[in-house]
Amino acid sequence: MIVTLTVTVVSVISQQQQQHHQQQQQQQQQTTEATNPTTIKTPPPSTAATTATTTKQIGSPNCYNCLGCSSVDEGTTQVVEDEFMSCMTTLVLDSLLVIRGGSYEEHPDGECIGNTQTFSCWCTGECCNDKTIDY
């Protein structure tokens, strides 16, 4: 019976040692995880070329608006509409009448077109249709 007891005690001691050893390993692993910083790799900054794009805001420039005005001044009426694509100045050739206003058609800045009846120029800036027409 003593032998059996001894075996039982040794068996219990052996189990306790295993549990203690497992606990130490777990604690050591937790300590290692806590003290080892996690490294997060981030991609290097992009070296791709970037291009700035400038776009013309379409619509609504303020334009001088008058009929029969070869020149403009601070008293000349200005008009703005959301649909304006440019400002225009037109000279009616047979009467030399100058017409200024906004245009619903898109034209390149500075474009001028003439025919047998009229000569018209368009611009895209604020109140850009201010050039004096001498005839």
Image (cartoon, rainbow, N blue to C red):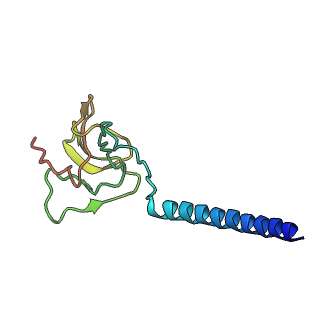
Q: In this view, does 107 lie above or below 30?
A: above
Instruction: Report x, y in % for residue 74.
Output: 15, 64
Q: In this view, does 80 lie above or below 117?
A: below
| Quadrant location of the N terminus in the rendered image | bottom right
Using the image as rendered, state which of residue 68 and residue 61 is in the foreground. 61
Q: Describe residue 97's horizontal placement relative to residue 71 as left or right.
A: right
Instruction: Report x, y in % for residue 32.
Output: 49, 60
Instruction: Report x, y in % for residue 60.
Output: 35, 55
Residue 82 in which image quadrant: bottom left
Instruction: Report x, y in % for residue 52.
Output: 29, 43
In this view, which residue lies farthest toward the left?
Answer: 134
| Number of residue marks | 0
Using the image as rendered, state which of residue 80 and residue 75 is in the foreground. 80
Using the image as rendered, state which of residue 31 and residue 17 is in the foreground. 17
Picture residue at 28% right of the left edge, 57% below the top: 62
Q: Describe residue 15's horizontal placement relative to residue 87 as left or right.
A: right
Picture residue at 42% right of the left edge, 48% below the top: 41
Picture residue at 15% right of the left edge, 56% below the top: 72
